[in-house]
Image (spheres, helix red, strand yellow):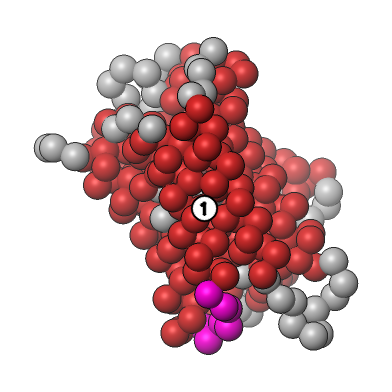
Amino acid sequence: MDFIGELSALATSFFFAITAIIFTATGRMVGSQVTNRMRLVFGLIYLMVLNAILFREPLPFSADSSRWIWLGLSGVIGLSLGDAFLFQAFVSLGARLGTLLLSLAPIFGSIIAWVFFGETLTAMQITGIVLALAGIGWVVMSHEEPADTPHGHTRRGVIFGVLAALGQATGLVLSKQGMGGEFSPFQANAIRMLAATVFIWIWALVENKAGATVTALRGKPQVLRLLALGALAGPVLGVSASLLAVQHAEIGVASTLMALPPVILLPVSYFVFKEKFGWQAVAGTALAIAGVAVLFLA
């Protein structure tokens, strides 16, 4: 099918926009760490069932050890650590600004590829990076904290958002290394999800927070339903679509199309959640996305 990579990247943006809304809500109800732990559990269950149906094995045990290593590292860094920072950014800043900061991921990805894999950056690509940074900076500077917001709340949220973008970029680069040749994105995603789930729950046990996770969810079936829906939209459909996009399209084109959730969330935030923001937020978001497009389409 023509443009399967591009269409998958565009679908990724819509799935991630939906996920951002859901996990912002659950993060504010039960906390970002509980959200991260449980959505990984739901995501792993979904993927194991899906892989059992498609490939007659819940996990790709026949895959090469090198795939398991690359994709396992990708899951730990991208899905465990990166998304832990992302959900905290959602809680602090909201879905719109949190996803905008995540648009830094393609920039970090380019820098990582340049440093570790010898890929060069042209003058036009550097211009795209500058434009994207300027747009994101513009939006952040125009953001006004509500009067009852604790001091430094926005600053912490921005730091979490930047770390989330770095984690996602690193995870994407590692995924690219682990998906060489013909390998199903659903199988790759299952390896990533398994590694992320094991890591995050071992971490919770070490910190003695596993029981607190169950306690936080007890008596809140509405949160469990939202987490189940968010896990289906994001970790399963969204991440699988992103891996399919990276596999079948130029990584620059795919990354640009996958950077659109902040644009999708602008009307949602304004009309649905009644979030107030000025023309600076709209212009800055457009400038940031344009910068990402210049970076990868130059």
Main secondary structure found in the magenta portion: loop
Q: Out of 72 and 160, give the one closest to the viewer.
A: 160
103 on left or right of 93: left
Q: Position of residue 193 (x, y in %)?
A: 51, 40
Residue 18 in which image quadrant: bottom left
Compared with 157, 104 (above or below) is above
Measuring 41% from the left and 43% from the top, which residue is drawn there? Answer: 293
Question: Crowdedness of circle 1 by 10 Å Cα count: few (<14), some, many (20+)?
Answer: many
Residue 73 x, y percent position in the rendering: 59, 28
Q: Amino acid at mark 1?
A: Ala
In the rendered view, does 67 fall on the left or right side of 165? left
**Residue segment shown in magenta:** 273-279
User: Residue, x 48% and y 32% (percent of image)?
Assistant: 125
Q: Residue 140: tell me if it is visible.
A: yes
**Residue at 75% in and 52% down:** 159
Q: Is residue 3 left or right of residue 121?
A: left
The C terminus lies in quadrant: top left
Q: Is residue 278 magenta?
A: yes
Q: State how many labels appear.
A: 1
Q: Which residue is most to the right?
A: 151
User: In which quarter of the view is residue 200 placed?
Assistant: top right
Percent of width and height locating residue 271:
44, 84
Q: Is residue 170 above or below residue 221?
A: above
Residue behind mark 1: 288
Q: Position of residue 47 (x, y in %)?
A: 39, 45
> On the rendered image, what quadrant is the N terminus found in?
top left
Q: Is residue 226 visible?
A: no
